[in-house]
Image (cartoon, rainbow, N blue to C red):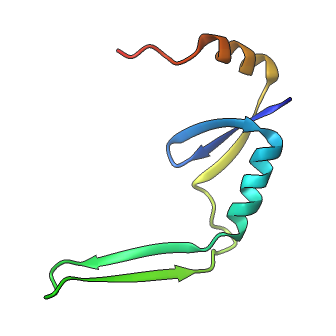
Amino acid sequence: MSKAIIRIGYNDFVVDISDAVTLMEIMSKAENYKTKHDYEATPSTTAYYIWEQEPTTGDSITISLLPDAVYRVAKLAGAPEKK
């Protein structure tokens, strides 16, 4: 089965293409969440925010196709050596 590379932030993950599509469908429905801490206030305070995504949001998650031949060779190679 064909694979896809999903990049979330600075990490890459390999999944089946159908799973990548499912993940993107789920993320398109997700709401943004953020906390802001004010440590200078006495006592310190935390505010919580949740809001709808903008249509152009989503540049932190990308999907690219991984050819089957490349997947098989990379799978055989395993994890890279740590230096």
| Residue drawn 62% across the image and 37% down it | 13
Depicted 22 relative to depicted 18: above or below: below
Depicted 36 relative to depicted 70: above or below: below
Farthest right residue in view: 1
Depicted 69 relative to depicted 57: above or below: above
- Rendered location of residue 57, percent (x, y): 62, 66
Give left or right: position of 23 versus 42: right
- Rendered location of residue 83, percent (x, y): 34, 14
Please state which of residues 64 and 12 is positioned toward the viewer in this rendering. Answer: 12
Farthest bottom residue in view: 42
Give left or right: position of 36 versus 18: left
| Residue drawn 65% across the image and 69% down it | 30
Please state which of residues 55 and 29 is positioned toward the viewer in this rendering. Answer: 29
Q: In the rendered image, which quarter is residue 54 located in? A: bottom right
- Rendered location of residue 53, percent (x, y): 63, 74
Q: In the rendered image, which quarter is residue 7 located in? A: top right
Depicted 7 relative to depicted 74: above or below: below
Give the number of marks: 0
Q: In which quarter of the image is the N terminus?
A: top right
Q: In the rendered image, which quarter is residue 43 located in? A: bottom left
| Residue drawn 66% across the image and 68% down it | 56
